Amino acid sequence: MTNKKRKRNNNNNNNNNNKNDVSKKNQQEISSASSTPKRTKSNQPSNFLQKILVLQMRARLSGGHFRMINEKLYTCTGKEALNYFREDSSLFNLYHAGYKTQMSNWPEQPVNVIIKWLKKQNPSFVVADFGCGEALISKSVKNTVFSLDLVSNDPDVIACDMANTPLDSSSADVAVFCLSLMGTNYQTYLEEAYRVLKLGGWLLIAEVKSRFDPNNGGADPEKFSKAISELGFNSVKRDFSNKMFLLFYFTKKEKHDSKRKKEIEWPSLKPCLYKRR
């Protein structure tokens, strides 16, 4: 065999070997690519949408729990509500989280109107905040404030039934009910406010406007005011200017020949129930 033929054969063998190496390398790359899925652009929005759906589902569950607890509070007595939260205090936090969400849709908060009013009064006034929630009044004014609610997650909040507080008789200058006349026995809360107020003391009530719409099953504001007057208060002012809530201002009468509590005709207050959206 001549030298030229030998070189030609060697070159052919080298070319074949190179082709085989390239072929093996391509197969390895293909195999590796198939075993490791790439992150495609289409996968990313899919994962993002899944997260959104999970968050929406959680929000719906939270909203459902809020509506359930809210309906419970409007349709049971204060004592039953107290026992309800004692069994599971986490429900109280869940309720107030939903409450804050609902209130965020209101153009004006009634508690802020009450705080503004209090800041114009004597700072020595002692305030009893019935159903204080997050105790915003106590945190916003210089007055001494007794913050009362069914559960206490704050050392400054007193946990109790609003119809049976530990406050002394004639110890407060102002009693506040800000969206907190919720129980079926709401009149006993007002009787308790009468007990703890000093003569001439103020009673402020803020409530959802729909609860006082007689044309849609709500109470008649006149009958409500009359019942409170018969309990031993003077009606000083009513503010119906806000589209979401109304405000009643009363003072405790200096002298009063009150009717027996059983003789007062208390109107039924319509529960404020939220629809599912």
Image: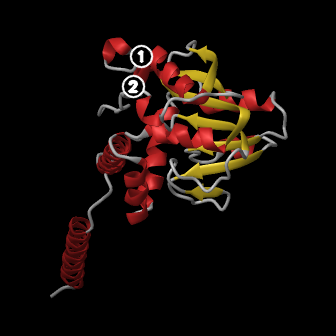
Asked if 159 appears above or below 266 in the picture, the reply is below
Residue 129: percent from left, percent from top: 63, 43
At horizontal 84% and vertical 41% (from top left) the residue drawn is 124
- Residue 267, disc: 2
The earlier-in-sequence mark between 2 and 1 is 1
| Quadrant assignment, res 196 | top right
The residue at which mark 1 appears reads as 220
> In which image quadrant can residue 166 be found?
bottom right
Residue 238 % position (x, y): 60, 16
Left or right of 276 in this view: 141: right
Quadrant of the image for the N terminus?
bottom left
Q: Residue at x 52, y 57 (%)?
A: 151
> Tag 1: residue type?
Asp
User: Is residue 106 something one can see in this rendering?
Assistant: no
Callout 1: 10 Å neighbours few (<14), some, many (20+)? some
Residue at image point 53% right, 52% down: 164
Badge 2 marks a residue whose secondary structure is loop
Distance from label 2 to label 1 (Cα)? 7 Å
264 lies above or below 30: above
Q: Considering depth in this image, is 259 or 66 the residue closer to the camera?
A: 259
Tell which of 254 and 95 is nearer to you: 254
Residue at the (21%, 79%) spot, across then down: 17
